[in-house]
Amino acid sequence: MLTLLWFGQDLRLTDNPALAAAIARGGPITPVFVLDDLDAREWAPGGASLWWLHGSLRALDESLRQRGNALVLRRGPAEMVINQLLDETGADAVYWNRRYEPWAVARGERLKTALKERGIEVWSFNSALIQEPWTVSTQKGEPYRVFTPFWKALRATCVSEPAAAAARIPGPATALEREPLSSWALRPTAPDWAGGIQAMWTPGEAGAQARLEDFAAGAASDYRDKRNMPGVAGTSRLSPHLHFGEIGPRQIWHSITAQALANTGNPMPAGVETYLSEIGWREFSYHLLFHFPTLPEAPLRPEFARFPWEENAKGLAAWRRGLTGYPIVDAGMRELWNTGWMHNRVRMIVASFLIKDLLIDWRIGEKWFWDTLVDADLASNSASWQWVAGCGADAAPYFRVFNPSLQGAKFDPEGDYVRRWVPEIGKLPNTLVHSPWEARPLELADAGIRLDRTYPAPIVEHGAARQRALEAFSRIKKS
């Protein structure tokens, strides 16, 4: 009796239902990770995600070795590799934790059918979500399309306690051939563009747990007040760990609430409730992706298929490079390029600028985030871009157009965030650091700035761009 344990986006040993079930079954376990480059096709992991995956797999293998086992790495179509491993090992069961991307759902169904025909025991489990998408529905039995009632329904459910990691995971008597992780070339070499990512992140279960403990003991209680301030450490930065399954939502939920109750007792602090609702938004995004599998490619509001997007290669290049002339936008795009991450408030600002100030299709921004974010998650990324564009579920109305200079002044009032990522304007006073084009020539000279030389003038005038966006929206309403 031998069980193949197929890891996917569940790269942890704690609160891993498939692993726990494999141990409970008895007998040796062969843990395997399959790098299936072709299955996701255009949504194969981007460069930043591959960088993270390398570190996460290395950490998982180390944890397995500490428990008497080791991770088998194979590259190729997952269904073919799993069947090959069954032939090599003589395993009579395959266990895994479910994924919810459209291709992963289809692949799991095909594989279950094929394995059962071979007489193989096969089980899949939920490690990624508090409640799976088909278990939360409206009174009519339909999927939710608005967050607030979805959140009320989810919040009323019982969140099960996370299970501890096993002290030992029995391995097979004969070691299997393992592809070296280095042979996959997941990390850049020449040039190595990942220095800033390396400095900021520690992939793996231990890194996730350390970040959770730090957040639960500190910033969680103030999350409601500080979450929108990119210049302060007010968010958990757990998103990449969650995406790769190095930590699960049940672990986060119980750790955050237990710490809050220990510190303050009932009622739950407002900051913690707000943070839990952000976990709810992640669940809502998966709910949408499962029930509306075209979410990454097609607007949920069909009238937006007729939106008159513009070709603007020059504007797109300036946006990607952080050279739009709007400091809060440029700071966010540079933070993204250097660290593989961007503060959530700033994500909304830069997305609004691309979609509404430049009239560039939201799917182009979605793709750029997909390649550059270490937390690039198909459900959250797609739902968030549709939300900003006004074409998704529970979307912000299209006429809500962020004014980047006012957003910067409101949420980065001292200019700390902008000065960190746009140092060339750092000597401007707080009153001008978010709108350097309003500075007088003497003020620019004192700050060492030459507009369009050392820092660009705005590539669009926001007021005019906003009006143009609203006129474009009015045309699709009329049609």
Image (cartoon, rainbow, N blue to C red):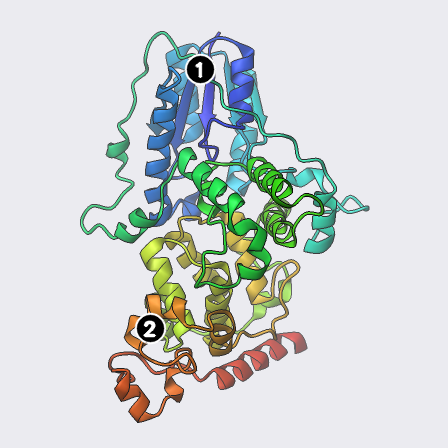
Circle on res. 323? 2
Q: Which mark is residue 143?
A: none
Q: From what the image shows, is residue 211 above or below residue 27?
A: below
- Foreground tag (2 vs 1): 1
| Quadrant of residue 452 within the rendered picture | bottom left
Which residue is label 1 attached to?
168
Q: Amino acid at mark 2?
A: Leu
Q: Which residue is rendered at x = 40% and y = 54% of the image?
A: 341
Tell whether 308 sits left or right of 272.
left
Work out whether residue 118 or residue 105 is closer to the camera in this orientation and state it. Answer: 105
Q: Is residue 58 above or below residue 233?
A: above
List the single residue furthest toward the bottom: 441
Q: Position of residue 146 (x, y in %)?
A: 70, 56
Relative horizontal placement of residue 348, taking residue 253 as reference (left or right): left
Q: How far apart are the alpha carbons under marks 2 and 1?
A: 52 Å
The secondary structure type at the circle numbered 1 is loop
